[in-house]
C-alpha cells in the first residue's frame, strides 16, 4: 500500500478524554475515531488489525470443531422474558420499540437467541455435541465507558455456545475451548494468563478468564510463585490458617478488657488511640444482605471480599449498610460493633482472625472497644469462613508458594453454564433412553475490539505502538528518505519485492521530511522499518525493529527472503529477532 493513497490521519495531540495509552495511541495513530461515548468508527488501519484478530479466532474456533453462525443484533423481548433476564439485566440493556410498540433489545450477549436456535433444530442426542460461534457487534450501555476500546458501549465480541447431552460432554467442550483460547492468545503474541474466575450466581467451579497482563487493567489477579494457580482476586480462595496456639513461654494474655475509646470509630483512629498496628485489630463491615443486617469481620489491615461474603451469607444482594439504618434496626453502634457478644444479627468472621494471638475489637457499646481479645478463646458467636481479599504475599492455598499480584485486562472468558438457560427456556432433546432432557451448555466470549487496546497497553513506548507482528496492520514500512534519486528508486524496488514475497508492506511515498516519516512509522507501530537513505546506491539499507528498537545496516541482497521467512515465524506469535535478519 502507498501511504499517499491510504487514509491514515495521524494526530500530534491525543484527544482530551483519552486517559489510557491505548486510547490515546489508537486515536493519534489513525486507527479509530469516536462517534459518541463508548462508540467508535474503525479507520482503514483499525479494520486491518481487527481482521487479523478475527482471522486467528476463526481459524482456532474452526479447528476446535465450532461452527460459525451470525445472529441478529436486535432481539425480541419475549426471548429475554423467557429466560428471566428482561427484568434482571438492568440499565446496561439497551431496550427499544418498533413501530408497533413491540419491545426489543440490542444484544449484549446471545444465550437466548442461540438457545432458541438449538431448541428448534436439535431434536436428538445424535445431533450433539454442537458448538456455535459468531463474531458480532454487541451493545452494553456501560455506566462508565472508558479507555476507548477497553470498555466501549458498542464493541465486537466473539461469542460461542456449546450444547451437550450430559455434564461430562459439557466439561469436554469446556476443555476444548480452554485449549483453543490458549492457542488464540499465544498466536496473537500477547502476554496472558488464564485465571480462575467467579461463577456468579450460576455456581460451580468452571470459569476461567483470560487476562492480558497490563498496568491499565481493571482486574486484580493473584498468581502463585511456585505452582500453576492463578485467579481473579474476586475468586482467589485463601487457606484457613487455623486457631492460634500459644507457643511455650509466650506471655499469658489476661481476660478481655473493656476500654473507653472516645471517637475511635475507624481502624486508623483506634490504632492511634491504643498505640497498636492495624493487624492487631478486628474490623467490622456492616451490610444489608437481602434487606437484613449482617456484619463481616476481617483483620484490621485486610479488605473484605464481598463475593465471598455473599456466598457465605447465601444472599442475592449485598450492599454496605447505611449507619443510621443499621443502628436503628439492630441497636448496635456503628463504629463500635464487636464480635464477642451474641447478637440477633448474622455475624461472619474471616478465618484469619482465629490465628491472631490477641486483638482489639468493638464492644457493641458507644465509645468503647475490648482489648486482650484472644479470638481462639473469646469469639464464640461468629461463623468463621474465608472472607478476605487475597493480596501479594499471601500463602498459596494449593501449595507452599506465595501469591504475587498483577493487573489484568480480561480479553476472554470461558464459562460452564449447565442448564440455566436450557431449563428456563425449555430447550430439550431426546436422550439415548428416549426421554426429554435439557441441554448442558457452556458459553465462551472474546473481546475482539478490546484485544487491540489490550495489545497496545502491553506493547508501546513513548513514541507509539509496538505491535506484535500478528496484529500489525502492515508488517513492514519502507521509508525512502528522498522522493527522487537512488533512495526513491531502491525503495520502490524493495517495496515491490516485499509484496512479491507475500509480505504486507507499505511505502511512505509522501513528499515529507524524514522526521515526519519516522514519527508516523513509530506511532503506527509497523514491526519493521526499512529506511532507504544515504547508502541506497551501494544497495545498503537501514533496518529498524520497532519492538526491540534494534537498528542496523544491512545489504539488500538476500534481505527480502530472510525478512519474509522471519515474518512467517513471527506471524505465529513470536518476537522478531535481529539475528534472523542478518546474513
Ligand atoms: P467485564 O467484567 O470487563 O465487564 P464481562 O464479564 O461483562 O466483562 P463477558 O460478558 O464475559 O464480559 O463478555 C465476554 C468478553 O467481552 C469479555 O471477556 C471482554 O473481553 C469483552 N467485553 C465485555 N464487555 C466489554 C466492553 N464494554 N467493551 C469491550 N469489550 C467488552
Ligand atoms: Mg461487563
Image: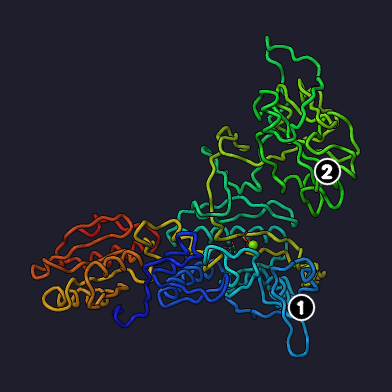
* Residue at the disc numbered 1: 77
Residue 351 quadrant: top right
- Mark 1: is the Cβ under 8 angstroms from ligand 1? no
Which numbered disc covers residue 294?
2
The front one of 130 and 115 is 115
Q: How many marks?
A: 2
The front one of 413 and 32 is 32
Element under disc 1: helix
The front one of 201 and 463 is 463
Q: Residue furthest top?
A: 249
Percent position of residue 199, x then y: 69, 54
- Mark 2: is the Cβ under 8 angstroms from ligand 1? no
**Residue shown at 22% from the left, 69% from the top:** 514
Examine the rendered structure and indicate whether residue 499 appears above or below residue 522: below
Marks 1 and 2, how far apart at CA: 37 Å
Q: Quadrant of the N terminus?
A: bottom left
Percent position of residue 406, x then y: 53, 46
The answer to whether residue 434 is seen in the rendering is yes
Which numbered disc covers residue 233?
none
- Classed neighbour count for the residue bearing mark 2: other residues with Cα under 10 Å, few (<14), some (14–19), many (≥20): many
Q: Quadrant of ligand 1?
A: bottom right
The front one of 327 and 575 is 327
The answer to whether residue 428 is seen in the rendering is no
**Residue shown at 67% from the left, 40% from the top:** 303
Element under disc 2: strand
Q: Quadrant of the C terminus?
A: bottom left
Examine the rendered structure and indicate whether residue 315 appears above or below residue 455: above
> From the viewer's perspective, is the residue at label 1 or at label 2 nearer?
2
**Residue shown at 80% from the left, 73% from the top:** 82
Percent position of residue 503, x then y: 30, 72
- Classed neighbour count for the residue bearing mark 1: other residues with Cα under 10 Å, few (<14), some (14–19), many (≥20): some
Which numbered disc flags the more N-terminal residue, 1 or 2?
A: 1
Amino acid at each position: 500500500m502507498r501511504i499517499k493513497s491510504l487514509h491514515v490521519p495521524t494526530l500530534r495531540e491525543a484527544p482530551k478524554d483519552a486517559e489510557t495509552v491505548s486510547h490515546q495511541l489508537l486515536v493519534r495513530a489513525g486507527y479509530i475515531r469516536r462517534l459518541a461515548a463508548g462508540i467508535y468508527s474503525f479507520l482503514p488501519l483499525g479494520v486491518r488489525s481487527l481482521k487479523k484478530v478475527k482471522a486467528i479466532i476463526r481459524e482456532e474456533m474452526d479447528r476446535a470443531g465450532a461452527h460459525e453462525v451470525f445472529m441478529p443484533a436486535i432481539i425480541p423481548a419475549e426471548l429475554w422474558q423467557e429466560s428471566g433476564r428482561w427484568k434482571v439485566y438492568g440499565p446496561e440493556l439497551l431496550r427499544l420499540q418498533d413501530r408497533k410498540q413491540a419491545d426489543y433489545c440490542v444484544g449484549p450477549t446471545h444465550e437466548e437467541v442461540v438457545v432458541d436456535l438449538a431448541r428448534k433444530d436439535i431434536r436428538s442426542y445424535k445431533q450433539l455435541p454442537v458448538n456455535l460461534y459468531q463474531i458480532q457487534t454487541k451493545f452494553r450501555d456501560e455506566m462508565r465507558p472508558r479507555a476507548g476500546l477497553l470498555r466501549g458501549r458498542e464493541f465486537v465480541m466473539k461469542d460461542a455456545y456449546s450444547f451437550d447431552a450430559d455434564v461430562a460432554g459439557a466439561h469436554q467442550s469446556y476443555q476444548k475451548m480452554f485449549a483453543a483460547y490458549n492457542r488464540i492468545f499465544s498466536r496473537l503474541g500477547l502476554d496472558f494468563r488464564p485465571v480462575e474466575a467467579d461463577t456468579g450466581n450460576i455456581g460451580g467451579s468452571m470459569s476461567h478468564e483470560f487476562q492480558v497482563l497490563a498496568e491499565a487493567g481493571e482486574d486484580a489477579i493473584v498468581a502463585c510463585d511456585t505452582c500453576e494457580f492463578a485467579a481473579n482476586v474476586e475468586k482467589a480462595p485463601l487457606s484457613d490458617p487455623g486457631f492460634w496456639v500459644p507457643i511455650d513461654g509466650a506471655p499469658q494474655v489476661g481476660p478481655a478488657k473493656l476500654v473507653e475509646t472516645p471517637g475511635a470509630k475507624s481502624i486508623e483512629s483506634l490504632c492511634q488511640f491504643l498505640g497498636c498496628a492495624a493487624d492487631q485489630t478486628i474490623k467490622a463491615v456492616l451490610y444489608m444482605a437481602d434487606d437484613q443486617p449482617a456484619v463481616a469481620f476481617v483483620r484490621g489491615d485486610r479488605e473484605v471480599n464481598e463475593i465471598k461474603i455473599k456466598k457465605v451469607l447465601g444472599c442475592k444482594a449485598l450492599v454496605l449498610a447505611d449507619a443510621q439504618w443499621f443502628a436503628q434496626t439492630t441497636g448496635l453502634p456503628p463504629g463500635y460493633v464487636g464480635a464477642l457478644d451474641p447478637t440477633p444479627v448474622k455475624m461472619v468472621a474471616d478465618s484469619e482472625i482465629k490465628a491472631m494471638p490477641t486483638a482489639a475489637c468493638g464492644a457493641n457499646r458507644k465509645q468503647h472497644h475490648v482489648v486482650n481479645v484472644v479470638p481462639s478463646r473469646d469469639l464464640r458467636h461468629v461463623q468463621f469462613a474465608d472472607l478476605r481479599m487475597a493480596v501479594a504475599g499471601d500463602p498459596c492455598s494449593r501449595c507452599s508458594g506465595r501469591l504475587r499480584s498483577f493487573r489484568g485486562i480480561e480479553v476472554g472468558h470461558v464459562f460452564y453454564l449447565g442448564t440455566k438457560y436450557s431449563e428456563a427456556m425449555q430447550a430439550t432433546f431426546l436422550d439415548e433412553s428416549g426421554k426429554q432432557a435439557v441441554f448442558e451448555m457452556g458459553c465462551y466470549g472474546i473481546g475482539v475490539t478490546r484485544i487491540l487496546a489490550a495489545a497496545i497497553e502491553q506493547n508501546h513506548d513513548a513514541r507509539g505502538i509496538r505491535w506484535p507482528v500478528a496484529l500489525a496492520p502492515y508488517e513492514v514500512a519502507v521509508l525512502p528518505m528522498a522522493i527522487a534519486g537512488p533512495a526513491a528508486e531502491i525503495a520502490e524496488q524493495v517495496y515491490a519485492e516485499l509484496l512479491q514475497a507475500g509480505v504486507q508492506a507499505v511505502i511512505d511515498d509522501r513528499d515529507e521530511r524524514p522526521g515526519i516519516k519516522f514519527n508516523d512509522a513509530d506511532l503506527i507501530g509497523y514491526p519493521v522499518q526499512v529506511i532507504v537513505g544515504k547508502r541506497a546506491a551501494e544497495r545498503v539499507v537501514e533496518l529498524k525493529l520497532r519492538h526491540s528498537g534494534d537498528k542496523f545496516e544491512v545489504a539488500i541482497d538476500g534481505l527480502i527472503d530472510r525478512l519474509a521467512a522471519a515474518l512467517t515465524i513471527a506471524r505465529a506469535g513470536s518476537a522478531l529477532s535481529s539475528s534472523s535478519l542478518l546474513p
